[in-house]
Structures are given as structure tokens and as C-alpha cells.
Amino acid sequence: MGLGALVLALTGVGEVLFGHPPMTHWKLMVHMSAVPIFALGLAAVALTWADLCRKESVPRLGKAAKVLFWIVLTCGLVVMLSGVLPMLPFFGTHGEHVLYLTHRYAGITLTVAILLHLPALRARPAPGR
């Protein structure tokens, strides 16, 4: 998931911050090529970490790490759905634009959540919590 997320962040969020959106040509091809790696990785992370990140689970992780985990999963799902749904004929021009903006801002939120989650994994919860 990390490799896919890194490529997607560099090509997607990097394009918004440092380039001239919307992304086109080879950047779009690289972006789309990283999607399966990210999607399979996100599913694997969800299956392997969800039990550890439940609210009432054993306190091996701090609250911040648990909350950020669920934000990453939620934003990941929103990003994937808002990237696929515009390919269906159910949305007009306005609907596709809303999905494009949803994809953009959920992607930015996902990137920030991943960057915050990594140091939160290292933080140990205080005893008794």
C-alpha cells in the first residue's frame, strides 16, 4: 500500500501543489498504474489491522493511531469510488465535476492522514489507557 500511496500522492497531490492540474499524459498513466497496487494494499491493511484498531481492542496502539487508521480507510474508499464512478453513465457534467473535486480533496486528506499515521504508530499509549 505504501508504494501505491507514494506514487499516487506524488502524481496526484504533487500535481495539485506543484503542477498545473488537471493531470494529463504520462503523469495520468503513472497515476492510474499505481491504483491496483494501492487498492490491493489498502484491502490487505484493512483486513490485517482492523481488529487492532477497534475502539475496545487491546491498547497496543494509541487513540490517534486508531482514529487515523479509520480515516485512512474511509478516505481510501472515497478516493477509489470517486475515481471510478465518473466512468459510469449515471452522472451529468455537474455530477462528474463534484466527484472530481471529491476525489481531489479526499486524496489530499488521505495523504495527510497517512503522513500523520506513520509517527502515531510509533507513539506508545500511556499506561492505563
Image (cartoon, helix red, strand yellow):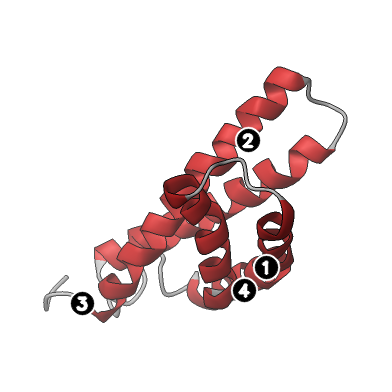
Residue for badge 2: 100
| Residue 41, horizontal then vertical, whole percent | 62, 74
Q: CA distance from mark 1 to mark 3?
A: 30 Å
Near mark 3 (Cα within 10 A), the count class, few <14, some 14-19 or many ≥20, is: some
Q: Name which of mark 1 and mark 3 comes first in the sequence.
A: 1
Query: Observer-nearest residue: 110 or 70?
Result: 110
Q: State the image quarter where residue 39 is shown.
A: bottom right
Q: Name which of mark 4 and mark 1 comes first in the sequence.
A: 1
State whether residue 51 is above or below residue 23: below
121 sits left or right of 47 in the view: left
Q: Name which of mark 4 and mark 3 comes first in the sequence.
A: 4
| Residue 49, horizontal then vertical, whole percent | 49, 75
93 sits left or right of 1 in the view: right
Q: Are marks 3 and 2 in contact (CB under 8 Å)?
A: no
Query: What amino acid does circle 1 point to?
Result: Ala
Q: Are marks 4 and 1 in contact (CB under 8 Å)?
A: no
Residue for badge 4: 41
Q: CA distance from mark 4 to mark 3?
A: 23 Å
Query: Disc 4 on helix, strand or loop?
Result: helix
Residue extending farthest right:
89
Q: CA distance from mark 4 to mark 1?
A: 11 Å
Name which residue lies at 69% across and 19% down: 94
80 sits left or right of 3 in the view: right
Residue 34 is tagged as: 1
Residue 71 is tagged as: none
Q: Name which of mark 4 and mark 2 comes first in the sequence.
A: 4
Q: Are marks 4 and 2 in contact (CB under 8 Å)?
A: no
Q: Name which of mark 2 and mark 1 comes first in the sequence.
A: 1
Residue for badge 3: 123
Q: State the image quarter where residue 52 is shown.
A: bottom left
Q: CA distance from mark 4 to mark 2?
A: 23 Å
